[in-house]
Image (cartoon, coloured by chain):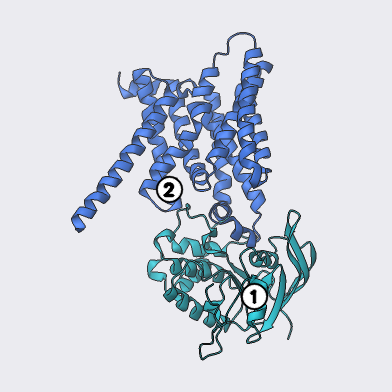
Amino acid sequence: MTVENILSYEFMQNAILTGIMASIICGVIGPFIVTKRMVFISGGLSHTALGGLGIAYWLGVKPLYGATAFVLISAGIIGNLKEKISDLFIGILWAVGVAIGIIFIHMTPGYAPDLMAFLFGNILMIPRADVIITFILVLIVTLPVFIFYRGFVSIALDEEYARARKLPVRALNMGLIILIALSIVTLIQVVGIILVIALLTIPVAVASEISLSFKRIMLLSIGFGIVLCLSGLFISYLLELPSGASIILIGGILLILVKGAKRLSSHHRTIVSK
Amino acid sequence: MEHLIEITDVSFGYEDIPVLENVSLNIFEKDFVLVIGPNGGGKTTLLKLILGIIKPWMGSIRIHRDVVGRVGYVPQFASFNRNFPISAFEMVLTGCINAQNYFGKYKKDDIEKTNRILEKVNLYARRNENINDLSGGQIQKVLIARALVSEPLVLLLDEPTASIDITSKTSLLDFLNELNEKMTIVAVTHDPTPFALTYRHIACLNKNLYFHEKGELDAHILEYVYGCPVELLGHGVPHTLLKKH
């Protein structure tokens, strides 16, 4: 089967478009999550999506809407938590979200056909309508980051200094958490609730090995995200493997290779300088 | 002379625990006030109150109309996120950001000002280096440059000589002296030794504040503030040192 043949399928075109858009989100939001140490918050948000998903199944509405509502409500709660207690409550939200999801899915009669796709992602099953929703979500997430880039950088770099400069630190933090929530909703379609954190952090981790400039890390993360999503997509199609897991596994391998290459090159430089 | 900053009977605490009680302090134009006291004595809290980051429980803080929005701040050395990938130039540039311009792009003027200040602190040649690759003294200068880029009339410094070596301390204090010709400086420190030749007024803070002219400070006051024995050593110049104990 030629590449041209593969690309002629609509499901493949949808998957490629969604993969590219997901990568843009990874590159725009991921560096803030990693540098501001918000990985745990993001993990909590993504898992609360299961609660919304379960309720949506039970009510018979589109699961993505339920997940979005739940993640946004959780973002609002997390954004208002005091720093001292935030870890504890994020952990509780994480577990309660999953518990609600399990109970409502259990209470829903019949078989939930796309439940596994939401848990583990299936980029090959994304319909054209969801590609359009993803495009709108990408715009909603990326535009505020471009507009308020300096404000977000200020709070990620030095929150106390940002307060001294009278920046609306609380509003910017809340804005960032809401953008992370929307990013998670978008990425759940690609890699699922369980693996979404990996997609938000692995491209950034790889990019950070190569560059020490925040803007360049953003651009490189988008590039690595595209490489991961598209290679994972083709490998999963050709070898009939789960797409979300393939994308993350390739990401893990890429990170090990880049770290290994960096270590070898610095070792080589040390020997040459001696 | 009008005061640039007037702190009157200010009390403040965290949760229910008082940190400052009835603190009053007036700061003049081109003054160099050194606020000393033990760790946990309320020094950083006092700076945060002046900056408006926190509001006093009681009392008032009046900032002169010419100084409103022109108070520069150099926080403690380790307060910024060392995990954030940023060059010295970009770090100083962030000093241009304020409540009116945290969106959009930097102006050409911001970039020119940043380059000028980096030249002034002798870091222009290293402007593109990652902040974590600089020495302690150089990082402190970058943080001061970040405050200076907003063209302040009052500069507040929190433990500016902590975490830097003796040579860097000397160079930093020379620089602060030079800045003091144009602006008011308020520095808080738990170790006043490096500032002995620099300050004009000294305030001892440990929940309560005692204000003194230069030369008025004696071992009795310091022992009261620090809560431990203190011996002063004369160095042939009007110069005050705390002996290690």
Residue at (45, 78) in percent of width and height: B171
The reply to whether residue A224 is in sight is yes
In the rendered image, which residue does mark 2 sit on?
Answer: A217
At label 2, counting other C-alpha atoms closer than 10 Å, the crowd grade (few under 14, some 14-19, many 20 or more) is many
Q: Position of residue B211 (x, y in %)?
A: 70, 79
Q: In the rendered view, does B76 fall on the left or right side of A109?
A: left
Q: Nearer the viewer, mark 2 or mark 1?
A: 1
Q: Evaluate whether label 2 is on the same chain as label 1.
A: no
Q: Which chain is cyan?
A: B
Labelled disc at residue A152: none
Per the image, the residue denoted by label 1 is B223
Quarter of the image where the N terminus of chain A is located:
top left
The chain letter under disc 2 is A
Figure chain in blue: A
Q: Position of residue B220 (x, y in %)?
A: 66, 80
Q: Is residue B11 above or below residue B31?
A: above
